Amino acid sequence: MAVELFNDGKHIVHAFYDLVDDSPGGAVQCNQFLVVDNGHGALIDPGGNMTYTGLLMDMQKYFSSKDLDYILASHPDPDIIASVNKWFVASHCKVMISALWTRFVPHFTTGKDVSDRILGIPDQGAVIRLGECNLIALPAHFMHAEGNFQFYDPVARILFSGDLGTSLVPHEQAAEPVTDFHGHLRYMEAFHRRYIVSRKVCRFWANMVRQLDIDQIVPQHGSRFVGKQAVADFIAWVEGVECGVDLMTQNNYQLPR
């Protein structure tokens, strides 16, 4: 079932939190997003094959898949974009992804030449026209992929942050916004320590996004941060998190015994 994040009558943002069965031993919980502006639509990180049917059926209630303009992919992991071939069949959409990863996308397809439907985002990011609004692809490299982007919606004032902000919360909690930031840290810390490459890029990211007017930060896994205070708390935490190569020592690089 879709959760409405924004709706002014012309611009609509929906999130889908419950399309993955994340029972023990199953797949990791992940979120999918639909942005519609004046009859044009984009899916952000639509997921793999297990999310496709549910997402297709749910989104039809609000927007026809045949009118889909874009799939916006933060990076090329299977839980982000493994269903891309089905979306190519169901719509006329084009995929936008880091230019580093454009030649990896066809590995999720049947082998037909789809190069004209894959658009590479340059490292510095891009402005993406959707209907009567502009979405912004923001550099988020090494958070966690080498070529990685977040997507900012200036109409809804939502930052879709990809894996940054991931929380491994109970399934039923994912659709609820964070209400206790410090209590929520236990769901985020281990993931960020392992999957985000370094504190250096975290500081650069914080400096960049503080220039934006953000009402919500919405990750691809787990709960979202809603309100100026929650957004500020999250950015401040990211800026100071010790992670990735900062934590590596020679003990992590030894011959197995």
Image (spheres, rainbow, N blue to C red):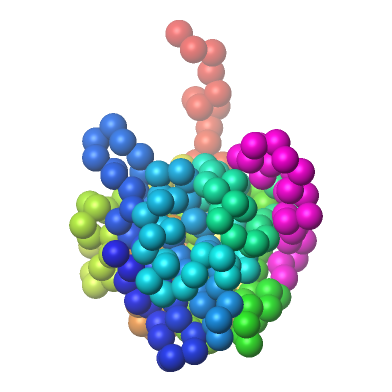
User: In the picture, residue 172 is in which quadrant?
Assistant: bottom left
User: In the picture, residue 5 is in which quadrant?
Assistant: bottom left
Picture coordinates of residue 153, whole percent (x, y) = 54, 78
Picture coordinates of residue 90, whole percent (x, y) = 56, 56
165 up-or-down from 214: above or below: above
Question: Which residue is more in the foreground, 182 or 80?
Answer: 80
237 up-or-down from 134: above or below: above
Q: Is residue 255 visible?
A: yes
Magenta stretch holds residue 218: no
Query: Residue at image x 38%, y 60%?
Result: 57
253 up-or-down from 164: above or below: above
Query: Residue at image x 65%, y 62%?
Result: 92
Query: Residue at image x 31%, y 36%?
Result: 26
Question: Which residue is more in the foreground, 245 or 8?
Answer: 8
Question: Which residue is more in the foreground, 115 or 24?
Answer: 115
Picture coordinates of residue 64, whole percent (x, y) = 49, 70
Query: Residue at image x 59%, y 60%?
Result: 91
Q: Is residue 151 visible?
A: no
246 up-or-down from 10: above or below: above
User: In the picture, residue 206 is in which quadrant?
Assistant: bottom right
User: Left or right: 41 with respect to 240?
Assistant: right
Quadrant for the N terminus in the image: bottom left
Q: How many marks?
A: 0
Magenta stretch holds residue 107: yes
Picture coordinates of residue 161, whole percent (x, y) = 50, 64
Question: Which residue is more in the foreground, 150 or 66?
Answer: 66
Quadrant for the C terminus in the image: top left
The residue segment tinted magenta is 102-126
User: Left or right: 209 with respect to 4?
Assistant: right
